[in-house]
Image (cartoon, grey):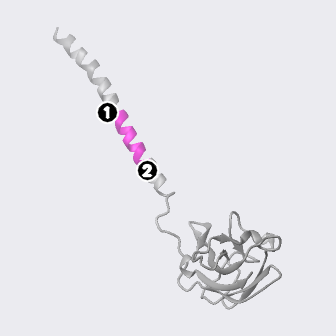
Amino acid sequence: MFTQIRRSNKKAVSPIIGYVLLVTFVIVLGVIIYNWMRTYVPTDELECPDGTSLFVKDYECNNSVLSLTLKNNGKFNIGGYFIYATTNVTQELATRDLTLYMSDNTSRLNPTGIKFSGEMNSLKPTNEETETYDFSGTDLNIYSVEIIPIRWQKERRINRVVSCSESRIKEIISCG
């Protein structure tokens, strides 16, 4: 009788050991997956280096064509920019994206933005580039433009686009 009780205890103990091993395995697997997934989440926000700057050196507006001469007056190369415009005198925030009106279709970035010709970050300090926008066929009046430089920066061996929102400029333009 004593041996019979002993055998029944062994049978009751073996499923408990199985459950303990299963729970331990799941916890260890969860820790491994968590540490692996954590590497895919960026820890720091990508920012442009201090000293990134772009300004409108000159502009010309005639016959629904706007030509902007942009100059890199910063310390670092710039790859392109986002451009927005105000279409009303009282409008303070530029919301109209002018990318669609760019004359050179090869310079457009999807969904928005403009890349300077050449390689990534091709506009070197003190260099200039002239961009042309054609508004013919529209009744668009431009009162000011807001330009935000962009750069390509390597993050974990991958080139990523970084918006230099701290270097945003606004230029009043009379074009209507």
Mark nearer the N terminus (1 vs 2): 1
Q: Which residues are magenta?
A: 20-32
On the rendered image, what quadrant is the N terminus found in? top left
Q: Is residue 141 above or below residue 26?
A: below
Q: Sort mark 1 into few (<14), some (14-19) or many (20+) by Cα contacts within 10 Å.
A: few
Q: Specify whether 74 is left or right of 134.
A: left
Real-space Cα separation, disc 1 to disc 2, in angstroms: 21 Å
Residue placed at 35% from the left, 38% from the top?
24
Residue placed at 53% from the left, 71% from the top?
46
Q: Main secondary structure of the magenta part?
A: helix
**Given the current orientation, which residue lies at the most extreme top position?**
1
* Depth check, front residue: 33 or 162: 162
Q: Which residue is mark 1?
A: 20
Q: Is residue 22 magenta?
A: yes
Residue 77, image x and y in percent?
A: 65, 82
Residue 173, image x and y in percent?
A: 68, 85
Q: Specify whether 19 is left or right of 168.
A: left
Residue 18, image x and y in percent?
A: 34, 28
Q: Amino acid at mark 1?
A: Val
Q: Is residue 86 above or below residue 75?
A: above
Q: Amino acid at mark 2?
A: Tyr
* Depth check, front residue: 126 or 7: 126
Using the rendered view, name the quadrant where residue 141 is placed.
Answer: bottom right
- The image's mark for residue 34 is 2
